[in-house]
Image: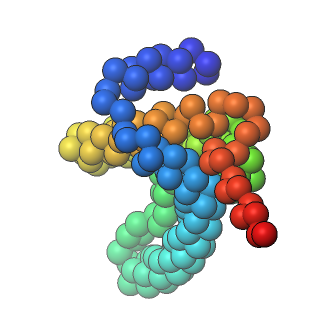
Amino acid sequence: MNGLETGLDNLFKKLPPLPAGFRKGLATALPWLALAGGILTLFSLFAIYQAVIFVNSWVGFADSFYTSMGYGTTTSGAGLFLWLSLGILVIQAVLLLVAFPYLRKGKKMGWDLLFWSALVNVIYDVVYDLFSGYMNIGQLLFSLLGVIIALYFLFQVRPNFMGGGASPVTPAKPVDKK
C-alpha cells in the first residue's frame, strides 16, 4: 500500500498546488467533513436499507399474486450488487467515522483511513460499472474522475498530517490581557 501512496503522491505533486491558505483551511475542515460524511452515509444507508426491505416485501407480494394467477415468478428482489453496495457504504461510513479523531489530532492514520475509503470507492465503482449487467462506461469514467479529484485534494493536505501528531492548524495564541 505504501508503494501506491508514494506513486500517487509523486503523480499529484506534478499537478499545480492549491493555494497554501486553502490547503490549511481544508486540513482544518477535513476532520469535520469526515465526521459529517460518516454520519450522512449512515443515515443514507439506513434509508436505503428501509427502501430495500419495503420493495422486497412488495416484490414478494407480487410474486405470490402472479403465482396464484398461474404466471410464475416475476422477479427475484434485491440482487447481489445492491447488498454489496450496502456493505461498502457500511465500510466507508466506518472508515470516515474512525478517521475523525485521528484527523482532529493531525495524525497520518486519519489521512490513511480517508485514503482507504477512496480506494474502496474505486474498487466498488469498477466492479459495479463493469460487472453489474449495466456496463455503463460513461458512469465509470465520471466515477473515476470524481475519485481522482478527491484524491488530488487529499494529497494536497497530506503534508499537514505527516507530522505524526501535530495539529494540522497552528493553535491561536492566547491574548495577553494587561
Spot occupied by residue 30 in the image (x, y as percentages of width and height):
56, 53
Q: In this view, does 169 lie to the left or right of 66?
A: right
Identify the image quadrant of residue 50: bottom right
Which residue does the image show at 57% across and 31% down from the upper left? 159
Which quarter of the rendering shows the N terminus? top right
Which picture quadrant has residue 40? bottom right
Res. 95 in view = no
Residue 151 pos. (x, y %):
44, 37
Nearer to us in this view, 69 or 171: 171
Residue sitting at x 44%, y 40%:
20
Q: Check the image and name the residue furthest to the left.
A: 138
Residue 57, given in percent of the width and then of the height, sits at: 54, 80
Determine the residue positioned at 44% across, 17% down: 10
* Residue nearest the observer in this picture, 46 or 114: 114
Left or right: 58 in relation to 71: right
Q: Residue furthest front?
A: 178
- Looking at the rendered image, the quarter that the C terminus falls into is bottom right
Relative to 44, say whether 167 is above or below.
above
- Viewer-closest of 25 and 104: 25
Q: Position of residue 86 (x, y in %)?
A: 56, 58
Q: Residue at x 32, y 27 (%)?
A: 15
Q: Report whether residue 41 is seen.
A: yes
**Would residue 139 appear left or right of 70 to someone viewing this image?**
left
